[in-house]
Amino acid sequence: MRVDVGAVMPEMTAPEQALPDVAGLARFAERAGLDCLWAEDRLLAGEMSVLDSTLTLAAAAAVTDRIALGFSVFVPSLRPLAWAAKQIASLQHIAGGGRLRLGVGLGGGSAEEYHAAGLHREHRARRTDEFLGLLPGLLSGQPTPIPDAAGVAGISLRPAMPVPPLWVGGQSLAALRRAVRFGDGWLSGFQTPGEFAASAARLGELAEEAGRPTPRLGICVHVALGSHLDAGLAGIAAAGMQRMFGLPADRARQLAIGGTPRQVADHLAPYQEAGAQLLAITCQPAPTEQSWELLADARRLLNQS
């Protein structure tokens, strides 16, 4: 089964790193033949510099024609829900051609991040479900009551836009249930191939119980690529996960992938064999044109096997 391989934009960077050339990287990703550009959604990330995910994808959309654009994942609970829907509708128009893939999840933001947004982290699951339930009505332009506007009969957003494919993120049982209820796809992260396969099987069981189609499967993976054999590349990927997400060192080493395009393709193949149709790849330590060119080689090799 063919798998789409895309790259995560480096909109979250360490203090010593330069901010990314979003337009230049987007053009290169399309020329290289990657299937999708992904953006992670954060407001704050400690000392890391963070660019706005919707603006990052809008800038990428403006300079490309073919490549898909996606969130991995959009966090609606950090925003007023009507404003979140307006951002998605606007990006649908800017991207055009059905290129947008809307990954939605709770995210891993801290209480500080929610405090900065004037919201509460403990409400994020409820507000995410509310957003997913309200999104079709809001994007269609129909009058839609929303909890953020108590006492208002309904809000009508214009212009009306189709709902993009929904990829619900998360690994918990609640996230799997959310994917079955709302999603066209399920987007995992921080799982080994065996863990991914077990979650995918549970997702199928939940879909059967609910009488709904099983969502498509995807996963976000962290990779360090090199043109030559280098035993230290997996360690580079692990260090990046520790720095960016605070993963314990042993867990980061368990999840990290490093090597040449052939080696990386071989490491990604078990996800494909478990049913993954989509891979969102974060290249460590920081993506470059060279690493994305090597990723495009890994994509080709993976889909040849």
Image (cartoon, rainbow, N blue to C red):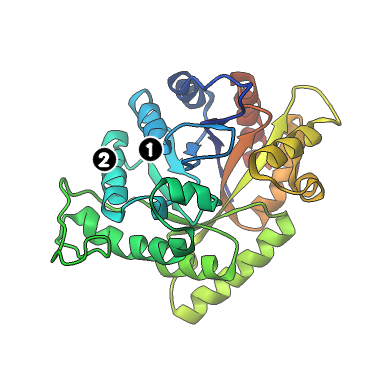
Query: Which residue does the numbered mark 1 point to in the structure image?
Result: 54
Quadrant where the image shows the C terminus: top right
Q: In terms of image quadrants, where is residue 151?
A: bottom left
SS type, badge 1: helix
Q: In terms of image quadrants, where is residue 227?
A: top right
Above or below residue 242? Residue 212 is below
Residue 18 percent location from the top left of the image: 57, 19
Comparing 194 with 236, the one in front is 236
Residue beneath the point at 66% across and 51% down: 190
Spatial CA distance of label 1 from label 2 is 9 Å
Above or below residue 204? Residue 22 is above
Give whichever of discs 1 and 2 has the lower sequence position: 1
Comparing 143 with 69, the one in front is 143
Q: Amino acid at mark 1?
A: Thr
- The residue lying furthest to the bottom in this view is 209
Give neighbour class at mark 1: few <14, some 14-19, many 20+ (Cα, 10 Å): many
Q: Could one spot residue 100 in this view of the protein? A: yes
Q: Could one spot residue 66 in this view of the protein? A: no
Query: Which residue does the numbered mark 2 point to in the structure image?
Result: 90
SS type, badge 2: helix
Residue 55 percent location from the top left of the image: 37, 32
Please report contact status of discs 1 and 2: CB closer than 8 Å, yes or no.
yes
